[in-house]
Amino acid sequence: NSLVSTTVGPKSQGQAQGANQGMQSVARIVGPFIAAWAYQYWRGLPYSFGAILMLFGLIVVYYFMKQEKNNKLSQVELN
C-alpha cells in the first residue's frame, strides 16, 4: 500500500488506493477458484504457481525501486 501511495501525486491518492483495494478484493475472490482448479490436476501446481507469482512480484518491486533510486540520483545531480 505504501508503494502505491508514494508513486502517485497527492490528488490521486484516493483513486490509487481504491483501485489497489479493488484488485486485492478480486484476487481474494478469484484466487481460491483458480487454486482449486489447478489442485485437481497436480497437487503441487497451486504452490508452483504461487512461487512464480511471488518471483514476478519481486522482479516488479526491484524494477520500481531501481527506477526510484535512479530518479533520486538524477535529481541530486541537477541540484
Image (tube, grey):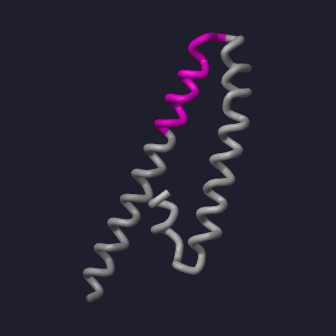
Vertical order, 68 against 20 (above or below): below
Left-right relation of 12 to 2: right
Q: Which residues are magenta?
A: 42-55
Instruction: Label the magenta part by its dominant secondary structure.
Output: helix
Residue 45 within the segment the image draws in magenta? yes
- The residue sitting at 66% across, 60% down in the picture is 19
Q: Quadrant of residue 76?
A: bottom left
42 and 19: which one is in front?
Answer: 19
Vertical order, 51 against 3 (above or below): above
- The residue sitting at 32% across, 77% down in the picture is 74
Residue 46 within the segment the image draws in magenta? yes
Which x, y percent locates residue 59? Answer: 45, 45
Which x, y percent locates residue 72? Answer: 32, 73
The mark total stands at 0
- The residue sitting at 40% across, 51% down in the picture is 62
Vertical order, 68 against 52 (above or below): below
List the single residue furthest toward the bottom.
Answer: 79
Which x, y percent locates residue 39? Answer: 66, 15
13 and 40: which one is in front?
Answer: 13
- The residue sitting at 26% across, 82% down in the picture is 77
